Amino acid sequence: MLPIQPQAVQELLDKLKDRELYLHLELTNGAYTFERDRSKLVASNMIRNVKVSYSHGSVSGSGPYRVGLKMPEGWIYAEGLTHYEESETEKAVLAGNDRDGKLVVSLMLSSEPF
């Protein structure tokens, strides 16, 4: 994965809009946090293989980045994104890593289930 280049990610989001896609959205500070320090709150969520279609996608920020997807009834967004998979042209694979390189957030869109 490469550091996010906003223009490249924006072009990919524009290419995928108005299509039925599968969404994977995940946020975690990791179970490893609790194992090292039981005083820290462990939080996570995951949405996987939910069908979505968005009319507008946008990249904002100066790094880490935020990606928002305009849905018919509201928005889906992920914040803290730092990297993307450059070789993908038919799906979006975005991730946010912490200072230690551990995954904190991911946002993926594809015409095929994950």
Image (cartoon, grey):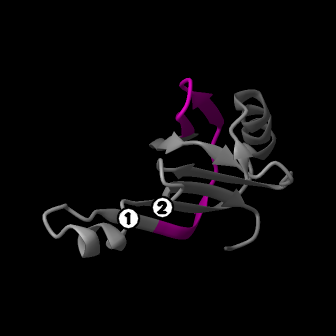
Frontmost residue, 88 versus 19: 88
Q: Position of residue 113 (x, y in %)?
A: 69, 73
Residue 39 is at least partly visible in this image: yes
Q: Mark 2 = which residue? A: 26
Q: Mark 1 = which residue? A: 45
Marks 2 and 1 sit apart, C-alpha to C-alpha, by: 6 Å
Give the residue drawn at x 19%, y 61%: 40
Q: Residue type at mark 2?
A: Glu
Q: Position of residue 94 (x, y in %)?
A: 64, 51
Q: Is residue 61 magenta?
A: yes
Give the residue drawn at x 61%, y 31%: 59
Q: Which mark is residue 32?
A: none
SS under mark 1: strand
Give the residue drawn at x 30%, y 66%: 33
SS under mark 2: strand
The main secondary structure of the magenta stretch is strand
Q: Residue type at mark 1?
A: Asn
Quadrant of residue 17 within the rendered picture:
top right
Say which label, 2 or 1, has the lower sequence index.
2
Neighbor class of circle 1 (other Cα within 10 Å; few <14, some 14-19, many 20+) is: few
Q: Which residues are magenta?
A: 47-69
Is there CB contact under 8 Å for labels 2 and 1?
A: yes
